[in-house]
Image: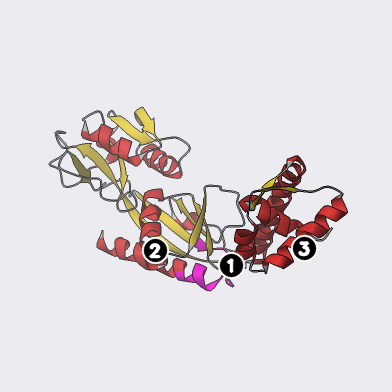
Amino acid sequence: MELTQLYYFYVASQYEHITKAAKTLNVAQPALTQAIRRLEEELGVSLFDRKGRGIVLNPYGKVAAAHLEVVFGQLQTMKEELERLSGNQSNTIRLNILAASLLMTEILIAYKKKCPECVFQLMQNETDQECDICISTVANADDISVSSVQEYRDVFQENIYLAVPAQSPYATRKSISLTEVADADFISLAGSKPLRSICDQYCQQAGFTPNIIFESDSPSTVHDLISAGLGVGFWPAYSWGDFSKKELVLLPIDSPNCQRSLILTCSNRNASLLVQDFYQFTYHYMKNLEHIV
């Protein structure tokens, strides 16, 4: 059996119509019919029954089509895997988002308008080594590990504010020290989030462990609970977007110096032109925000 014969039969089985299948395959109808007939001769069974002027799969054909669906599905998976490994997926960008997910969502939407044909494969995996671009965070730029010669990166600084309810006695302040809210109730990101770990470190520097009464994976939930007057919380300057309204106030923190580094990394200096273009787009988007705030 030839792979071409099997594929011709498989496409015909999807349509159960020789004319439509031949058009999809871009072959002449007689050539398609002959290929299926030769396959039937090799298998020793017919695969289609005539129904009026059309064809339908018979029980033998249904069994053959079910097996080929698995086979051609695996072949497609193999093709995609090989393309991924060889870097030939010219329209695909593999993006590992370990921080600033809301900001990256904004960037993806903006870039998709610029380049509709691009495809994003998103992941959140600290151990993944096969992404094209990664966004991550650390408290201090000095904590950034030495990069591989195969990658390049840019680092953006982001201040971290204290978000307080508009009705809080702190709301009229120009700035605040963390020691002043040592006894306050905190609304926080979940403990597994890198930003949570960074903010906990700053509380430790200020001499206390925050009394966290609610934690969530969602920045919008953190915003809503603080706005409702249930507590205070940390708020990155630009990577969470502009959630602040009248019911919430962002205060600069005098001490300690609460800041984090956002790290944009491209894992391959020989990345595709699309990956390089998206990297530059993201760089300028973030650099503009860094300067505005």
Q: Alpha-carbon distance for marks 1 and 3?
A: 48 Å
Q: Which of marks 2 and 1 is nearer the N terminus?
A: 2
> Could you tell whether 28 is left or right of 254 in the image?
right
**Colour pattern:** secondary structure
Give the residue at x 37% y 68%. 284
> Is 102 above or below relative to 4?
above
Front label number (2 vs 1): 2
Which label sits on residue 111?
Answer: 2
Q: Position of residue 113 (x, y in %)?
A: 36, 64
Q: Alpha-carbon distance for marks 2 and 3?
A: 48 Å
Mark 3 Cα within 10 Å, few/some/many (few <14, many 20+)? few
Front label number (2 vs 3): 3
> Could you tell whether 140 is left or right of 15 in the image?
left
Which label sits on residue 268?
Answer: 1
Q: Position of residue 131 (x, y in %)?
A: 57, 58
- Amino acid carrying label 2: it is Tyr
| Residue segment shown in magenta | 265-277
Q: Position of residue 230 (x, y in %)?
A: 25, 28
Q: Mark 3 points at which residue?
A: 34
- Amino acid carrying label 1: it is Asn
Disc 2 + disc 3, Cβ < 8 Å: no
Element marked by disc 1: loop
